[in-house]
Image: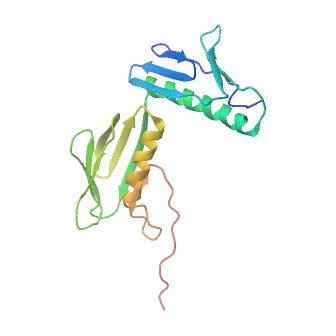
Amino acid sequence: MSRIGRLPITVPSGVEVNLDGEKVAVKGPKGNLDWNIPEPITIKKNDEGQLELSRPDDEREHRSLHGLSRTLVNNMIIGVHDGYQKDLEIIGVGYRVISKGPTQLEFALGFSHPVTVDAPEGITFEVKTPTSFTIHGIDKQVVGEIAAKIRKIRPPEPYKGKGVRYAGEHVRRKVGKAGA
């Protein structure tokens, strides 16, 4: 049995979960999310109000979908209750970020022009300092995807460490050119 898939999902107060066949709709104080569970996996509410996912047999594909489905439903519940955030920081002389409202950022990253990033629906940006900012949202996948796209604009380089990185990310440094 899957160690992750067999764990029950606790639904916190203030979060409402509607099960309609394979469709799971989660409504909470931060917003609404829905997702269709893959075919062989079934979901039901137990007597204590927790959600349980089960699979019909031990086929390889069914085993992998079991744990994945449980994790995705749990992430939806956490997202509508608490939300997700990703902190990023910018390292480099002259590199900075400017807020153009809660859904738009403008970066100065050493290019000949400023780079503007617009947030998709449900995502907001918060600039703490000119070199650090946070991405907020209820969908964990979208928050991570936007963070990765922003980091990709100017990833940290290994010689001086300049670029956009996740907060707390360790960049492996290389030794520069050896003098003769």
The N terminus - image quarter: top right
Q: Residue at x 50, y 60 (%)?
A: 171
User: From the viewer's perspective, is residue 37 above or below residue 115?
Assistant: above
Going by the image, does 127 lie left or right of 31?
Answer: left
Residue 108, horizontal then vertical, whole percent: 26, 59
Residue 9, horizontal then vertical, whole percent: 61, 21
Q: Residue at x 57, y 19 (%)?
A: 21
User: On the image, which quarter does residue 80 sit in?
Assistant: top left
User: On the image, which quarter does residue 45 sit in?
Assistant: top right
Q: Residue 8, can we see it?
A: no
Residue 135, horizontal then vertical, whole percent: 37, 41
Q: Residue at x 38, y 24 (%)?
A: 30
In the image, 137 versus 121, the foreground residue is: 121
User: On the image, which quarter does residue 124 sit in?
Assistant: top left
Going by the image, does 176 lie left or right of 98?
Answer: right
Going by the image, does 102 lie left or right of 122?
Answer: left
